[in-house]
Amino acid sequence: MPADPEGSTLGGGWRVTSRVRNPWGQVPLTAGGRSLPGSAQTYMERLLDQQIAPDTISRRHHYVPQTYLKKWSFDGKRVWTLDTAAHRARPLGIKDVCVEENFYRVVGPGGLPHNRVELLFGVVDSELRRVQSLFSDLDDPDVLEFDDLIALGVTVAVQRMRTLQQRRIQRQYNLWLHAQNPEDWPSFDDPTAPHRAAGIHTQAVFTGMWEAADVMTTRQIEIWHDPQGRFMTCDAPVLVPFDRTRRPSLEAAPYVLWPVSPHRVVALARDSQGEKAVIHEAGGKRIGAVREAVEQGRERMIFASGNQRDRLPTTKLFRRRAQVQMRCTDRTPHGEYVPPPGCCVEQSETFSAAPDVNLCSQGLHVPAPAMWELS
């Protein structure tokens, strides 16, 4: 931190607006995976080892880990589940929810499909179990180490990106790109390449995990504790709450929420308090904020503990969920001006019944009606 007085101008026109203590004693960034502390480096090596491991016969791939959902189970095997499409609440086996056959089956360099990505997620899930338990039981934030911060950031980043919801949103955007330029953007739904969507999705997860983790690790860890155990979760369990109808970016979101048990939510706050973690007893406002984030952020399933099964919103009509939103702008993502007749298409996510595509009428864009089939 520069020594200039608060509010003074630094080189290049930057100004110091505030100072917050760094409780970790280190810069909480991995530089996109290039600078890893000890346990994170070991984690990376374990992932790399799986790339050369023998293929697994496992075909049922969970995009929300079973170990995660066990925290909400009433008997260690089942969890109360609301299917928001069928408007039906019932107990379901943990091994039978948030699972699809060959969800992570990809084509290797030799042209043959394999399930080795499932082995990588075995490493991910093992670390998730440790991190989830750590923050579910944490009483003294001072026991947290720098490695725990990095592990939390990576766990939250990967869990957010690996879901069925993210796969659907990627497919929506692919349908638009394919309509614009089919030669450069082949369709995910090509029957001659049935594993293309899985390959692109899983590659995006493992190439983007460290950059996404760096966003998480620069946030303030808050732990919202509810003695009554009223927190629910869903099949997209890392929640970036919508601002009215638009989902803010990770950098702009006031909170990124990760329920870790019916009693605990890890809330990664944008505003730092200079502490390793801050534990708050959750009142009605925080309980309500998590509940709304779960109901709006779910893909299809909402999960509750046995004590909270009667609070599942079984009578609510769930007509909206996360969708692609596209707008034309005269600025690139880096702020560079795009003179007419050009434009830049900005992609974000919205809470809507269907994709929200409203682009300019300069004749630059081809309609992509197939997007609405994935709403």
Image: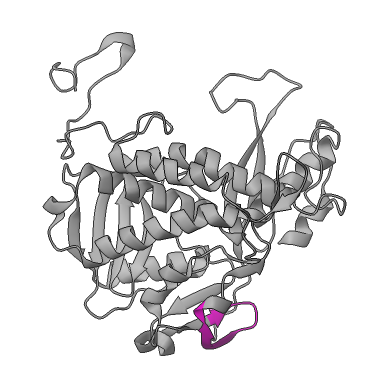
135, above or below 356, in the image: below
Q: Quadrant of the N terminus?
A: top left
The stretch in magenta equals: 82-94
Tell me residue 136's x, y (percent): 26, 66
At x 30% / y 17%, what residue is drawn? 14
- The image quarter in which residue 216 lies: top left
The mark tally for this picture is 0
Query: Where in the figure is residue 19, as x and y percent of width and height?
Result: 17, 31
Q: Quadrant of residue 103?
A: bottom right
* Residue 271: percent from left, percent from top: 27, 43
Q: Residue at x 58, y 50 (%)?
A: 349
State yes or no: residue 93 in magenta: yes
Q: Confirm whether residue 219 shows in the render.
A: no
Q: Nearer the viewer, residue 144 or 303?
A: 144
Which residue is depicted at the point 64% across and 77% down? Answer: 85
* Residue at 39%, 88% in the rendered image: 75
Quick one: 361 or 69, which is closer to the camera? 69
For the residue pair 164 and 87, the one nearer the viewer reads as: 164
Q: Quadrant of the C terminus?
A: bottom right
- x and y percent of residue 148 in the render? 26, 49
Residue 57 against residue 49 in the figure, above or below: below
Q: Is residue 373 visible?
A: yes
Most extreme residue toward the top is 11
Q: Residue furthest front?
A: 54
Say whether residue 75 is magenta.
no
Give the main secondary structure of the magenta stretch: strand
Q: How is the image coloured?
A: one colour
Does residue 32 sit above or below 289 in this rendering?
A: above
